[in-house]
Amino acid sequence: MPEYRLYCFAQSGNAYRAALMLNLIKANWEPVFVDFFKGGETRSPKYRTEVNEMGEVPVLVHGKKKLTQSGVILTYLSDHTRQFKPQGEDERLEALRWIIFDNQKVNGFLGPYRFLKNFARPPGDPAVMTFLKARIDNNLAIVDKRLADRPFMLGARPTIADISLCAYLYYPAGEFGFDVAATHQNINAWLDRIKALPGWAHPYDLMPGHPLP
Ligand SMILES: N[C@@H](CCC(=O)N[C@@H](CS)C(=O)NCC(=O)O)C(=O)O
């Protein structure tokens, strides 16, 4: 029986944060497929009662613990393994600062944009897409600037802040209709650095449910 179980599906960049972390720390884990697209599983009363009252993936099960919110899961795994862990109070708070910024403003906008463009029927209203794209451009520029003079978000070492921030950035550019790596050279180099870490895998290879039927 694997030590960790992760409720997830391949198209979820929010879940990818947790799946990638598990792979990078070489954890013994297995995915539990959540049928978001066909079954609307996260919205079912059963899921909300038995798995996550917030109606979301990722959900990590470790022994008697059940954790949700990727930022909490990343913190838990780094605390327990001491890998990708921010060192000392200043780094810990700095990582938290970027994880919150990411959840709200970077992948917090990229995820819905990609969903509305690819998967929602009808697709996103053009005014909404324009609003989201402007926010995405603004916030990616902040990340790109941050990475101009350091290899990883907090400095020389990769931490959970990096693993959070790359959530949607390895999905194909065609799913967004714009190419983040091609237009942000520091983000591009940083994505390559994360990709070079032992255990890195693409979201579509790491989690079940791709391609969609
Ligand atoms: N801030 C949360 C976001 C989780 C989230 O939004 N997950 C989406 C999938 S990408 C979800 O499960 N949505 C379910 C629904 O909308 O019913 C995290 O980082 O864990």
Image: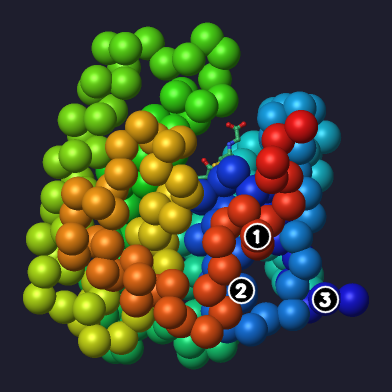
Q: Earlier in the sequence, mark 1 or mark 3?
A: 3
For label 3, count other residues whose C-alpha is less than 10 Å away and answer few (under 14), some (14-19) or many (20+). few
| Ligand 1 has an atom within 8 Å of the beta carbon of the residue at disc 1 | no
Q: Which mark is residue 2?
A: 3
Q: Which mark is residue 125?
A: none
Q: Earlier in the sequence, mark 2 or mark 1?
A: 2
Quadrant of the drawing holding the N terminus: bottom right
Q: Is residue 160 left or right of residue 134?
A: right
* Residue at numbered disc 2: 22
Asked which quadrant contains residue 38, the reply is top right
| Residue found 47% across the figure and 49% down from its top | 171
Q: Mark 2 or mark 1: which is in front?
A: 1
The three-letter amino acid code for the residue at tag 2 is Leu
Q: CA distance from mark 3 to mark 2?
A: 12 Å
> Residue 17's spot in the image, x, y percent?
51, 61
Q: Nearer the viewer, residue 127 or 86?
A: 127
For residue 46, above or below residue 160: above
> Residue 123's spot in the image, x, y percent?
48, 15
Residue at the outermost right position: 1
- The reply to whether callout 2 and callout 1 are in contact (CB within 8 Å) is no
Quadrant of the drawing holding the C terminus: top right
Callout 2 secondary element: helix
Q: Nearer the viewer, residue 45 or 24?
A: 24
Q: Which mark is residue 205?
A: 1
Q: Earlier in the sequence, mark 3 or mark 2?
A: 3
The three-letter amino acid code for the residue at tag 1 is Asp
For label 2, count other residues whose C-alpha is less than 10 Å away and answer few (under 14), some (14-19) or many (20+). many
